[in-house]
Image: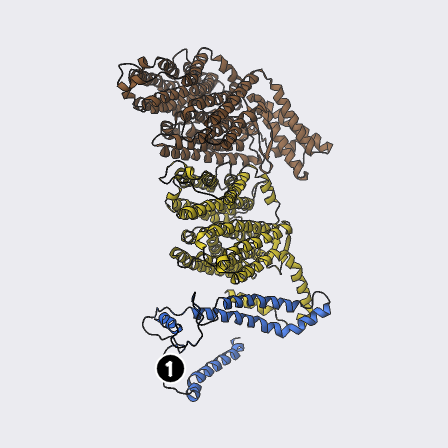
Chain colours: A blue, B brown, C yellow
Amino acid sequence: MLFQYAHALIGFLFGMLFVALQVFLLVRLLAPRVKEPMKDSTYECGEPPVGDAWVRFDMRFYTMALIFIIFEVEAVFLFPWATVYNDLIAGLRAAGTGNVLFPFIEVFVFILVLGVGLIYVWKKGDMDWVKAMRGQPKQSWPPTEGSTGERDVEKDVA
Amino acid sequence: MLLTLVTFIPLIAALVVLCIPKEQKDIIKWTSMGAAVVTFIISCQLIMGYRSGGTDSVAEKFDGQIQSVIDDNVADTALKASFQKGVQAIEADNVDDAVGADRGPVHYAEVAGIDLKSLDAAQSKAWHETWELSMAKGAAASEHIRFVEFGHWIDGFNIRYFMGGDGLSLPLIWLTALLSVLCLAYSWNITKATKAYFALFLILETGLMGVFLALDFFLFYVFWEIVLLPMYFLIGFWGGPRRIYASIKFFIYTLVGSVLMLICMLALYFHNGFDTFNILTLMEAAPGFSQTMQMWMFFGLFIAFAIKVPIFPFHTWLPDAHVQAPTAASVILAGVLLKMGGYGIFRFNLGLCPDAMTGAIQLPMWLGGNFIMFMAILGVINIVYGALCAMAQKDFKSMVAYSSISHMGYVLLGLAAMTDAGVQGAVLQMFNHGLSSAMMFLIVGVIYERAHHRNLNKFGGIGAQMPYYTGLATIGFFASLGLPGLNGFISEALVFMGAWNSHTASPAVGVFGLPTWIVFLALPGIVLTAAYILWAVQRVFMGPLKSETYKTFKDLSFREVFVLAPLGLLCIVFGVWPQLILGFMNDTLNTLVSSVIAVAGN
Amino acid sequence: MMFFALSKQAGQIAVTNADVQEKFPGLVQEITSNLGAFLPELILAVGVMWVIMADLFTRRERSRRMGFHAFAFVAVALVSVICHGFSGDQELFRGMIVDDGFGAFFKVLLLVGTLICIPMVMMTRSFDGRRMGEFYGLLLGSVLGMFLMVTAKNMIMFFLGIEFASYTSYLLTGYLKGDRRGAEGALKYVIYGSVASGAMAYGLSLLYGLTGSLDMADVAQGLIVSRTTDVTVLIAGLLCFAGFGYKIAAFPMHFWSPDVYEGAPIPFTAFLSVISKAAGFAVLLRFAEGMVGTGNWELTLSNGDVVGVDWPLVVGVISALTMTVGNFAALFQRNLKRLLAYSSIAHAGYLLMGIAALAPGAENAIPGWQAILFYLVAYLFMNLGAFLVVSIIAEKTGRETLDAYRGLGSRSALLSVALGIFLISLIGLPPTGGFTGKVQLIKAVVDDGQIWLALVAVVNTVVSVYYYARIIRLMFLEESDDTSKVPLSAPVSAFVVLMIVPVLWLGVFFGSTVDFIRDLTLTLG
């Protein structure tokens, strides 16, 4: 009977209502209104959508996104692990076989592998927003006056 | 042991030559020469030994081998006895010429009461080898094979190192060894990459020896391909101006043939669960092959060998290759390589497709109706067309090349006759052509070295200038022409006798006989041959000197005499006393024919 | 579709904490006991991290030394595979991968190939002044992915393996930043690769839908039941084949290979043309062998009824097309790398003959897979050997076109003779491994009664002579203006000689290799 799916339908309708409510109503009521040109831009993160849509934009967004994924994946696996950790240990203790540290070692190896990735990006300088050019001293962010950091960004955007 | 020596001494010498520094040209030459001479001496010994050896020794060798296979692998006495019973059953069928009977290993296992499924791996291998050897023994006896050598090569596929010589192969072995010595002597003044030249020549000799001696199809194929590469390089590196075109054409044509042969080889291997590459075993079993199988085998193998012979319409590589090749390579090419094709047709087409050779297999009319007519027509085309082409040539060497095509036509015609005379004539023609064409190419080489051109129309009056040369050249040319008293006459006469006799003699024993008109069609070939040879002799040797430069030509050097004189002598000897070589081949050839006739009789 | 399948499985494993306590110890024991058979993979995984890490703390000028590190890891992995032996017959990690002789054989093949490629990389000058740790890391990673491919029994696993190997390959193809051809090749590779992966994922999910399992053995078993849906099976099979075909560069999934081969650095081209291909064949073989084992492969019943899809014919046609396309395209190439790319497409065609002949016919006959394994061994040495010479010549002359080979015979006897032998082996003439390998493949199809395919193969062999012999001709028969000798150091000469030996050995004494391959175990579950 289709009727048994009614609760799904209700949930669906409720979801729609909720989203509509949130997007159109709540936002209008609660959000502060700042009249600023930046607010009208498509991407508030700083990429002005001016000119051709086929602009080259900064590779570092990719790098950052990838680094983010490393930790994202780590979290995805670590949370479930953490919830059952005590049970794992208890199980192993009860059985008396195998190393009790096994769950810990397993995750340690996992983190180690991710750690290698972290060391790699760190050492390669991808953690810094402004990468050191070969033969130039490292720049700090935000750039001090007269530094070259500013120029790089501008050039890339253009 | 002798066969292994005769095959591999050149190869070992080639490896030695490769290790000699290339500046030491004399050492390289003498090492090569030494190896070739040793090979020649051994080949002479083979020839002598063949005539005196008895059949029994080979049978004993087979028996000993079979016995040791059984003893080594089968411990159980009851099983041993049934193995022996199987051997006896096979041998009884060998004598009976049990045509059409299933002669596979499984059949004989049933006869002997061996349960193949209960055997372990070693035992079933042993049974297979016992079967293979017992079958081969039958063919070895009827082919009058001697000097057999057994060895295991790749057990997984039943590939053996199995060699042997008979009346068909040993003359060609001797010819190969002789021509190799002469060619190396003739190549003494090669200056371009001497080391590589001599090494390649020796590898070529190994390949040729192996082709004629191998009795395992796989081994045969390997040697067949080994011949290909040295020849490719000899033509391509030391050849004339269009050598690259000629060498690649030679390579590709021959390879087309050999891959066809490969397919046939594998089809035979899998036929009826035989799982063997042993040529003798397959020959012994051949009467039992179905006609369809034989037809396709015949086509595949025939095309493979026809390209090598070469037979019209696969002949176009030959003029190019011959004309461009250096003299010594041309000599080997004409003298021995073409015989590989002829040898293959005799050994494989005759041995493995008996129904095709009796004319029992029907073909469409445009292919002649049956295989005998098919071959005869191709033979006649070769004879007449080759002669006509030769007559039209302005280039001396290319005339000689086309004359080879014409002469190899006789081989085909003689085989198609399927009479004793015809087949003997055909094989003798191969041998004789090996002598006379080798001589003709050397003659062309000698004059080319002096004049640096080969245009027949530009020569003239050489006879007065170089009398010894002319004398020897005349022997070669007349031997090729078929003048009575020289060797060419005997073989051509035998071929014609056989072919003429075919329509009366062959049908009497159940073999298709050639109609007489075929012989008439071939006869103009003789006239045309006489015409182009005499015309060439006239243009080169007679008349006034056409150029002042010819006056500076010296007569033959000692080295050239050393090369030409033995060939001239042999042309005369075999012309006067053909029995010397015929008696040698007779046993093998007669049984080849009679085994086919036996199939027809059934 | 894929994710659906995954989440469905996940849904079935509803764990309670009591379950965890009960089941976990057994699981731990299973995993730890399986780790021994997984040692080579672990070594490679450590190798990947080690090379990348060590490179970070090495000065740029010394970065080339990472080659030695990578070489050592591969060598150790090779030793561990060999020590583990070729007679394993068990499933690992709950049937995700298997430990069998077939897999071990391929692992050895991959590792030996990599061992040959690494010195080639170290000899390449275009890598000078670059950090090489990442290159070797990716290379080892690629091998690791292929390890998973050749041992995978679960469809998810081999999909992941293929993806792992592919992604690293994309990166390695475009490793030389700023090289336009490399970038072009890498981009084409990515695009073709993702289309092929997508198609394969769809095919696999169809198979999952038809049979309800991801395990190859179960799928093959399940297909017997669903024989009525022939068209679906055909479509699913062809879609899967898109993935395999792309990996082995079979028609019509071969378009990427010439551009990639031409654009990639030579050592990596060699790696792609041999090692990657071998891994692809391993997966395809295992997949197909599963079908053969359950009788899904053969076409006709004893009463002549047609049942299921005629896979031998399908693969046979693909094989014939692949070799023909490869050979005819190779005829007109002027760039040797590109020529070898097309020739390797042709060789994929020859190898596919073995797959077409998988159904064993007469007794004592070699099943197609043994022929394929043997041919891959021969192909490994002859093709890598050819690439080795090509890379040495490219280093010395800076050219990859055929002109660079004019008159090589007089300039370097060793290199030209070596290349000559490799090319003769690629043609398939005795006494080389290429010949014995090709004979076995042709034998397999003849035995299976597909004479037409054997004829196509031999005609192709003849066609291939034309372009291979052209190189031989250029080297030996033609003369070049440049007659300067090509200097070779002793280790490089020894390396070249070392490659010739197996090619000739396999041509003359191939019995032991054949016996070895025959005795390999194949675990299909």
Between residues C53 and B537, which one lies in front from this camera angle? C53
The answer to whether residue B26 is left or right of residue B448 is right
Toward the viewer: C318 or C416? Answer: C416
Residue C332's place in the image compared with B22, above or below, is below
Secondary structure found at label 1: helix
Q: Can the viewer see residue B356 in this picture?
A: no
The structure residue drawn at horizontal position 37% and vertical position 45%, both measured from the top left corner, is: C334
Look at mark 1 in the image and give the residue it sits on: A39
Give percent across and percent down for residue B298: 47, 30
Near mark 1 (Cα within 10 A), the count class, few <14, some 14-19 or many ≥20, is few
Q: With B323 as the anchor, is B218 left or right in this view?
A: right
Q: Tell me which amino acid carries mark 1.
A: Lys
**From the viewer's perspective, is B130 left or right of B434?**
right
B21 relative to C173, above or below:
above
Quadrant location of the C terminus of chain A? bottom left
Q: Position of residue C424 (x, y in %)?
A: 46, 39
Place of residue B553 in the rendered image (x, y in percent of width and height, measured from the top left):
32, 18
Quarter occupied by residue B117: top right
**Based on the displayed image, in which of its 4 quarters is residue B367 positioned?**
top left
For disc 1, the chain is: A
Q: Nearer the viewer, residue C303 or B327?
A: B327
Image coords of residue B1 (percent x, y): 59, 25
State whether residue C104 appears in this view: yes
Number of marks: 1
C13 horizontally vs A123: left or right: right
- Residue B264 vertical placement versus B523 (above, below): below
Residue reaching furthest to the bottom: A29
